[in-house]
Amino acid sequence: MRQPLVVGNWKMHGNAGGIRSLMAELIEAEGAFSGAEVGVCPPFVFLPMVTELCADLSIRVGAQNVSQHDNGAFTGEVSAAMLAELGAAYVLVGHSERREFFAESSETVAEKFLAAQAHGLTPVLCLGETLQQRERGETEKTVLAQLDTVLAAAGVEAFANSVLAYEPVWAIGTGKTASPEQAQQVHQILREHIAVKDPAVADALRILYGGSIKATNARALFSQPDIDGGLVGGASLEAGQFAAICASMEN
Ligand code: PEP
């Protein structure tokens, strides 16, 4: 049985006051999460504050990015060891905004995945096709190529301590959501691909859907057999929406 997981990606939004209010509202709603594991990924600078606010709660904290390097002269970067020291539980790797705006290749994503695991963090590996790739019928080829690069670097066993997030690029921040059937189809492809290498790892692997999830579409998406939760961007900045999304996740 896979424990449902909903992770909020706050991206580069917020300030200390706003995040305190958001957390206060979320903390109040925590009782309604009905068995889902819930995490939030604030910008780096707010990690200590949010980790402290979540200290006695079930809400876990993650980062949105990590360096592939352990330490050294990498100005502006943050290592997995630093994130672990701050108490982060997860880290997003391969988010399409990192791939697109920061030219992160799948090879770099694989290095980040390994760096995260080496320091006890759970990588949330994001995969997804652009609209052009979907229209050319290349969805499967695209997501499997992204996945295969990490599988080749880390081995299938490493996926026992990771989470996948299928995030069609055309659905991120656009208000366009993949239909539950479209999302389920890709989730099933991803799980079956892992299952060829290790059925037990595939069976236990949580695969989240991400892309314009809202309180109104979460339940239909989450009711699909291979969708184990969500990676939520915009809607995670509104406590009421995010709490309702978390509460839509049934065990
Ligand atoms: C995301 O950034 O991972 C995401 C899914 O964003 P949104 O929910 O805003 O589409």
Image: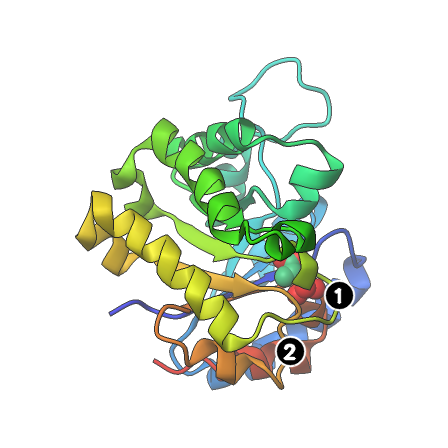
- Total marks in image: 2
Residue 153 makes an appearance in the image: yes
Looking at the image, residue 152 sits to the left or right of residue 19; the answer is left
Say which residue label 1 marks.
Answer: 174
- Give the quarter of the figure containing the C terminus: bottom left
Q: Position of residue 170 (x, y in %)?
A: 69, 59
Q: Name the residue: 53% across, 49% down.
A: 126
Closer to viewer: mark 2 or mark 1 = 1
Q: Badge 2, how many Cα within 10 Å: few under 14, some, many 20+?
A: some
Question: Closer to the camera, 83 or 6?
Answer: 6
Regarding ligand 1, which quadrant of the image does it lie in? bottom right
Q: Earlier in the sequence, mark 2 or mark 1?
A: 1
Dot 1: what SS? loop
Give the image quarter of residue 171.
Answer: bottom right
Q: Residue at x 66, y 28 (%)?
A: 77
Disc 2 within 8 angstroms of ligand 1 (CB): no
Q: Is residue 242 above or below residue 161?
A: below
Residue at the spot of label 2: 214
Q: Position of residue 143 (x, y in %)?
A: 49, 47
The amino acid type found where label 1 is placed reads Thr
Q: Is residue 202 above or below residue 86?
A: below
Is residue 88 something one can see in this rendering?
A: no
Report if the CB atoms under discs 2 and 1 are less than 8 Å apart. no
As helix, strand or loop, the secondary structure at mark 2 comes to: loop
For residue 138, above or below residue 8: above
Residue 154 image offset from top left, x and y in percent: 35, 31
Rendered residue at 46%/39% (across/down): 145
